[in-house]
Amino acid sequence: MFLDFLQKKSSATALESPVSEPKVEQPVPAPTILPFKPSHPSENPLMDISETALRDLCRHRIDAFESWSRRLIDETLKKSYTADYFNYMISDDQPLIKQEIKCRIENRIRNNPGRFPRKVDAFLLEDIQYLLCRDDLYKDHFKNVLEPFYSGPQEVRSIFNRLIPIRNKLSHGNTISIHEAEQCLCYTDDLISAYKEYYVKLGKERDYNVPTFTRIKDSLGNDIVRPASTASCSWEMFCNGSFAPKIQLRSGDRYKLCVEVDGGFDPSTYTIQWVVVQNLSDVICRGTGNTVDFALNVENVSYRPEIRIDLISKKAWHRFHKTDDYIIMNLEDVLPPIEDTY
């Protein structure tokens, strides 16, 4: 009996489930959060432009507006107050341009020799605002330019008061907001459009609406504004010191220049190609873009380099067959290295 009991106890024990270890719950991994990506592009295209590109765009547009404004002021005041309008006296005690502006312009020219070919090129937005919005000058000269677009000098003045702080931020490397960029681009575009409409009414519109070169600045400090006499043709110059700055280089010299294009045209609508040759066809260097940069060596000594820069719009037609504007610069003979001279 006892043995039977032990056998039954052993069988029951064998059938019992073993005691399981307590389960330790594994932590659930946190879900991966992906960076937010908008499902559609920004409604404001300026939001998709880098800060550097946006600043460059605004700076370029202000420069273009200043250039157009200087042209308008210079042509208008020359016509009514002689070529020396800067010193013109309306009466014995009233100068055309007040003494404060004269002193400021003269200081800029003195502190930056060679930068400003003409006094009007030293005018900044503040000076342009004063001349365009001064009551007598506005009434006599600029009302018919601006009033089809604006209600009067007060509105034009308020626009300048918004543009000047934006210009100051750009000049000092400070950040501008998207809204300020919009203001800059819209206001300058509207004012340039007003100027263009004025010239159309004068009959000075161009038969070919294509971009043109307006200015050259180089590494020697030369700043050359395009003469009005070349507006309807190519811009050619002999850089011998008579009608253009003398540019004579030596073997071993590196020369660099930048060209400016009419700011009323979007840079994406044209391309710039350039080539430097000697002996008519021997290529020294070639490239693209608005900066010409090349170096000379002993093989260039006694030759006269020629720089040709072509401006080509993306239209199906061109003003000069295959190009829309071009610059030709004939430099002086290249001299030997200075160590071989002395």
Image (tube, grey):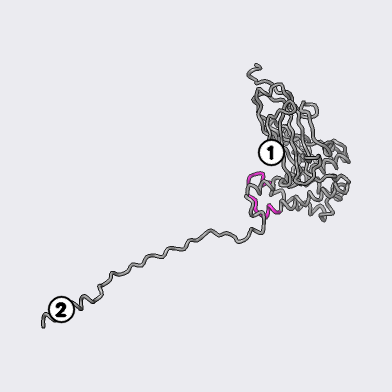
Which of discs 1 and 2 lies nearer the camera? The answer is 2
Mark 1 surroundings: few (<14), some (14-19) or many (≥20) residues within 10 A: few
How many angstroms separate mark 1 from mark 2 (CA)?
Answer: 103 Å
Q: Which mark is residue 288?
A: 1
Q: Which mark is residue 268?
A: none
Which residue is located at x 60 percent, y 61 percent?
A: 39
Magenta-colored stretch includes residue 181: yes
Q: Which mark is residue 7?
A: 2
Magenta-colored stretch includes residue 173: yes
| Number of disc labels | 2
The location of residue 119, given as percent across then percent down, is 78, 36
Which residue is located at x 70 percent, y 36 percent?
A: 258
Cβ atoms under marks 1 and 2 closer than 8 Å: no
Q: Answer left or right for 79 relative to 7.
A: right
In this view, 39 is above or below 191? below
In this view, 136 is above or below 121? below
> Label 1's element?
strand
Which residue is located at x 69 percent, y 38 percent?
A: 288
Judging depth in this view, the residue of 104 and 174 nearest the camera is 174
Instruction: Evaluate whether residue 111 shows in this view.
Output: no
The location of residue 138, given as percent across then percent down, is 84, 48
Q: Quadrant of the N terminus?
A: bottom left
The location of residue 82, given as percent across then percent down, is 87, 37
Judging depth in this view, the residue of 24 and 185 nearest the camera is 24
Mark 2 surroundings: few (<14), some (14-19) or many (≥20) residues within 10 A: few
Question: Most extreme residue toward the top, as rendered?
Answer: 342
What amino acid is labelled 1 in the image?
Answer: Thr
Question: Most extreme residue toward the left, as rendered?
Answer: 2
What amino acid is labelled 2 in the image?
Answer: Gln
Q: Which residues are magenta?
A: 167-182
Q: Quadrant of the C terminus?
A: top right
